[in-house]
Image: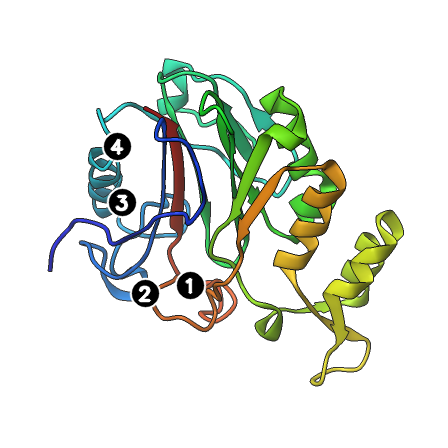
Amino acid sequence: MSERPTLILPDWPAPSTVGAFVTTRESGPSQGAFASFNPADHVGDDPVTVEACRRRLSAELDDERPLLWLEQVHGANVQQEYRAGFAEHAPRADASVAFDTGHACVVLTADCLPVFFCDRQGTRVGVAHAGWRSLAGGVLEASVAALGVAPDDLMAWLGPAISKAQFEVGAEVFDTFVAVQPEAESAFEPSPYRLGHYMADLYRLARLRLERLGVGHIGGGHFCTACEPRFYSHRRDDGNTGRMASVIWLR
């Protein structure tokens, strides 16, 4: 099987200076529960195979520039610079931005929502890891602020995440979102499986946040990681799985 990753390209009107993609698990060297393209080094996979996937990933960029890997903690911190030391010690953050061609931004997901950003001029890019905790904690708001341009000059694309039909949550998740943004109630339905639980629409929750910020263009949001076998899914696979990489950079 080819070690080259099978990629999804964002369907958005980004300028030609913006490169972006999401990996899938469809082809690559990873084995077992991590088959076939797992670039995540924190899930128990063979480190040699993970490194092989990361090298292949870098080769998909225009000039194999460094990728800014993060130690994701379901928070709202945004990393705004790249330093050589990050190759050994990834910064703790759940989003990053780039204003030049020095590095590429990357987040890892397997049900959580990756949100890509760029400005209409193609001079700034970023990507955020928006699981429900980081979404509720303000990672999208922090990302927009870090990009440093008027929100209506930005465009966003919502990558592969778990769908509403597969994402059951407790009442505390409902309460957390609705307390901050009452219209978030429209992103929840009572669960048909358990009393006091809800089916949550991550895509809808993200769109509501981005619309409130005034982001000019919002696309994507039509995947389901738990339904589609080409994706890793933490929930479907009981936590024993790899991760997709969402990567964005300036050419």
User: Quick one: which residue is furthest to the left in this view?
Assistant: 1
Label 4 and label 1: CA atoms lie apart by 29 Å
Percent coordinates x, y for residue 152 in the rendering: 65, 32
Instruction: Between residue 128 and residue 41, name the one nearer to us.
Output: 128
* Amino acid type indicated by mark 1: Asn
**Position of residue 249 in the picture relative to residue 151 (left or right):** left
Q: Earlier in the sequence, mark 4 or mark 3?
A: 3
Instruction: Between residue 152 and residue 106, name the one nearer to us.
Output: 152
Which residue was labeled with disc 2? 33
- Please report contact status of discs 2 and 1: CB closer than 8 Å, yes or no: yes
* Amino acid type indicated by mark 3: Val
Are there few (<14), some (14-19), or many (20+) residues within 10 Å of tag 3? many
Q: Is residue 25 above or below residue 219?
A: below
Q: Earlier in the sequence, mark 3 or mark 2?
A: 2
Label 4 and label 3: CA atoms lie apart by 18 Å
Which residue was labeled with disc 1? 240
Label 2 and label 1: CA atoms lie apart by 7 Å
Percent coordinates x, y for residue 221 in the rendering: 53, 57
Tag nearer the camera, 4 or 3? 4
* Amino acid type indicated by mark 2: Ala
Residue found 21% across the figure and 47% down from its top: 49
Are there few (<14), some (14-19), or many (20+) residues within 10 Å of tag 1? some
Are there few (<14), some (14-19), or many (20+) residues within 10 Å of tag 2? few
Q: Earlier in the sequence, mark 2 or mark 1?
A: 2
Which residue was labeled with disc 3? 50
Quadrant hosting residue 84: top left
Are there few (<14), some (14-19), or many (20+) residues within 10 Å of tag 4? many
Which residue was labeled with disc 4? 61
Q: Earlier in the sequence, mark 1 or mark 3?
A: 3
Tag nearer the camera, 2 or 4? 4
Residue found 48% across the figure and 71% down from its top: 236
Q: Earlier in the sequence, mark 4 or mark 1?
A: 4
